[in-house]
Image (tube, rainbow, N blue to C red):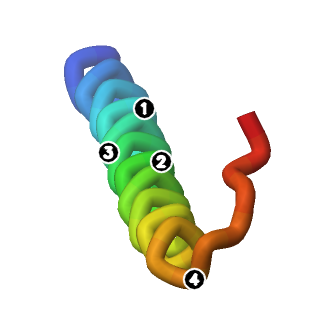
């Protein structure tokens, strides 16, 4: 039973980490696309 509990906990942690990585990747992709649009329009980038 302890093996099942440990496996479940590892599964939950793994799912949380995968979701966090996916979300952060999406944010970086969206920000890059937005900055490229600003660059095309001649806007100053917030650096």
Point out residue 9 in the picture as x, y percentages from the top left corner. Answer: 41, 29
Decide which of 10, 20 is in the foreground and name it.
Answer: 20
Q: Nearer the viewer's eye, disc 3 or disc 4?
A: 4
3D distance between C-alphas at marks 1 and 2: 17 Å
3D distance between C-alphas at marks 2 and 3: 10 Å
Q: Nearer the viewer's eye, disc 2 or disc 4?
A: 4
According to the picture, the residue beneath numbered tag 3 turns out to be 18
Residue 19 at least partly seen:
no
First in sequence, mark 4 or 1: give its number.
Answer: 1
According to the picture, the residue beneath numbered tag 2 turns out to be 24
First in sequence, mark 2 or 4: give its number.
Answer: 2
State the SS at label 3: helix
3D distance between C-alphas at marks 4 and 1: 42 Å
Residue 22 at least partly seen:
yes
Q: Nearer the viewer's eye, disc 2 or disc 3?
A: 2
Decide which of 14, 22 is in the foreground and name it.
Answer: 22
Decide which of 3, 10 is in the foreground and name it.
Answer: 10
State the SS at label 2: helix
Could you say which disc has been placed on residue 13 in the image?
1
Number of other residues with Cα within 10 Å of mark 1, as a class: few under 14, some 14 to 19, many 20 or more: few
According to the picture, the residue beneath numbered tag 4 turns out to be 41
State the SS at label 4: helix
First in sequence, mark 1 or 2: give its number.
Answer: 1
Q: Are marks 3 and 4 in contact (CB under 8 Å)?
A: no
């Amino acid at each position: 039973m302890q093996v099942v509990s440990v496996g479940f906990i590892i599964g939950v942690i793994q799912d949380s980490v995968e979701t966090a990585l996916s979300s952060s990747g999406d944010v970086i992709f969206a920000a890059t696309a937005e900055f490229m649009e600003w660059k095309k329009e001649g806007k100053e980038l917030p650096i």
